[in-house]
Image (cartoon, rainbow, N blue to C red):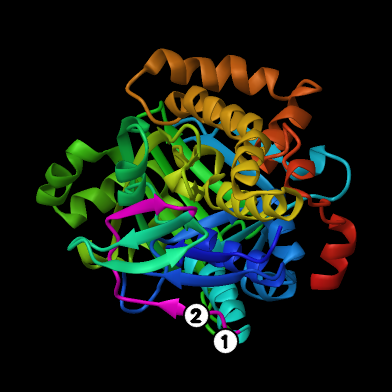
């Protein structure tokens, strides 16, 4: 296929990664961002072997490893009894896989700095309302109807509340989830914690508290941890009205060791309320436009796949464009290549979420007794590690990727 003019809406991880892949393949790319200054949204996230493989393919592995924090297991315990009810270890799988917890700012800056270094244009402060295709070209319009760009292909990476999806395809299937979480990024230097684990405490499925050590947001800074506390989003205002002291007391009652983290929170403004939804755009393309990341699919964060799936989308779309004769063929190939992996992990997220965020004591009892016992019996540890890694279904071959050699990567980044 001849080099294309490609407009990428959204300068988050998905859009930035897509820009790098496509520019390196010889296409002319332009990023369009609604904020005056592109920046990350959110606290910490866990990069899985899937997303790490994509970053490695972009040559960004040393940069992200220098900022992130290696994670070897996911561990959760009942807050009352101390009984372990979740223990997923990456080393249950051969090859040396691991996770890398990162601050969202670290992931953003790693990709953004690479885009800037390669001289790729980013137009900022532009709100997009719709994409319109005429005579094999796709124009992007602002809310006033003015054309802000005209391309051979548009890639929508604007996220779960994309206006381009709403204006381009049949309404996506959306299930708003009643549960969300308060998040904060806190200092963790000098505080006792397991720095190789995502640690969680549960009280049935109504309470979930977590600490994820995420490394540094920027070089030279102190190490940080992402702290989160699960709640129904409808209850958030009532929790705030009850006061910060009462909220902290409830958490320390469940998990006393969190006190040094909570001592850093003096205002509700330090906490961000995250809202979750299961959302699917089918197919993940329309005439002249491809949807990647949360504009194509989103889930609850229980399996930690969001950013990783977005990076896989970017790599897969670039691979499809490299091997197709036309844009139309490439979009169909992209959708087919991602379908199985996306559907599987959306299903798994839908199934697993109530075990950690729901009012059901029966489900929590099943999780704590039966599931926790079965999870120790092979091949369950390997299956759980593959689910967390994002590799239960092969995500690499359809994206034209080869998985990292993890043992070599660990030695190189040590």
Q: Is residue 229 visible?
A: yes
Location of the N terminus by quadrant is bottom right
Q: Position of residue 344 (x, y in %)?
A: 61, 27
Residue 314's image quarter?
Answer: bottom right
Q: In screen coordinates, is 61 left or right of 74? A: right
How crowded pointer 1 is (Cα within 10 Å; few <14, some 14-19, many 20+) is rated as few
Residue 258's image quarter?
Answer: bottom left
SS under mark 1: loop
Q: Residue at x 47, y 16 (%)?
A: 365
Magenta span of residues: 119-136
Q: Position of residue 413 (x, y in %)?
A: 79, 71
Please determine whether, in this image, residue 26 is positioned above or below residue 349. Answer: below
Q: Residue at x 64, y 68 (%)?
A: 27
Which of the marked residues, 1 or 2, is nearer the chain's N terminus? 2
Residue situated in front as seen by the camera: 35 or 184: 35
SS under mark 2: loop
Residue situated in front as seen by the camera: 280 or 253: 280
Location of the C terminus by quadrant is bottom right
| 3D distance between C-alphas at marks 1 and 2 | 28 Å
Q: Position of residue 410 (x, y in %)?
A: 83, 64
Q: Which mark is residue 356?
A: none
Q: Is residue 84 visible?
A: no
Is 241 part of what is drawn in magenta?
no
* Residue wearing tag 1: 220
Q: Which mark is residue 121?
A: 2
């Amino acid at each position: 296929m001849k080099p294309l003019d490609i407009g990428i809406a959204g300068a988050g991880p998905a859009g930035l990664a897509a820009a790098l892949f496509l520019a390196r393949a010889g296409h002319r790319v332009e990023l369009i961002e609604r904020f005056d200054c592109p920046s990350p949204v959110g606290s910490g996230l866990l990069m899985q072997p899937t997303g790490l493989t994509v970053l490695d393919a972009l040559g960004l592995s040393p940069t992200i490893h220098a900022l992130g924090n290696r994670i070897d297991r996911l561990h959760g315990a009942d807050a009352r009894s101390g009984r372990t009810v979740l223990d997923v270890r990456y080393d249950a799988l051969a090859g040396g896989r691991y996770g890398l917890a990162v601050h969202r700012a670290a992931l953003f800056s790693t990709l953004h700095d690479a885009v800037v270094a390669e001289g790729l244009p980013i137009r900022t402060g532009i709100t997009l309302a719709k994409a319109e295709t005429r005579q094999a070209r796709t124009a992007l319009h602002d809310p006033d109807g003015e054309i802000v760009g005209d391309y051979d292909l548009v890639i929508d990476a604007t996220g779960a509340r994309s206006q381009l999806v709403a204006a381009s395809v049949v309404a996506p299937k959306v299930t708003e989830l009643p549960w969300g979480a308060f998040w904060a990024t806190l200092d963790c230097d000098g505080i006792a914690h397991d720095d190789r684990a995502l640690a969680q405490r549960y009280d049935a499925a109504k309470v979930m508290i977590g600490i994820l050590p995420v490394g540094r947001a920027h070089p030279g800074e102190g190490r940080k941890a992402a702290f989160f506390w699960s709640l129904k989003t409808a209850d958030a205002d009532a929790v705030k009205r009850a006061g910060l002291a009462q909220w902290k007391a409830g958490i320390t009652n469940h998990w006393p060791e969190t006190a040094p983290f909570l001592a850093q929170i003096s205002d509700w403004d330090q906490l961000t309320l995250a809202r979750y939804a299961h959302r699917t755009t089918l197919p993940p393309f329309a005439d002249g436009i491809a949807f990647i990341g949360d504009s194509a699919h989103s889930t609850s964060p229980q399996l930690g796949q969001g950013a990783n799936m977005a990076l896989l989308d970017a790599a897969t779309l670039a691979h499809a464009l490299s091997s197709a004769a036309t844009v139309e063929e490439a979009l169909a190939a992209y959708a087919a290549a991602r379908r199985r992996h996306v559907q599987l992990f959306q299903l798994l997220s839908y199934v697993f979420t109530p075990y950690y965020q729901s009012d059901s004591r029966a489900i929590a009892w099943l999780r704590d007794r039966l599931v926790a016992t079965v999870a120790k019996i092979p091949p369950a540890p390997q299956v759980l590690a593959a689910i967390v890694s994002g590799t239960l279904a092969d995500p690499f071959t359809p994206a034209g990727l080869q998985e990292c050699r993890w043992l070599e990567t660990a030695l190189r980044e040590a």
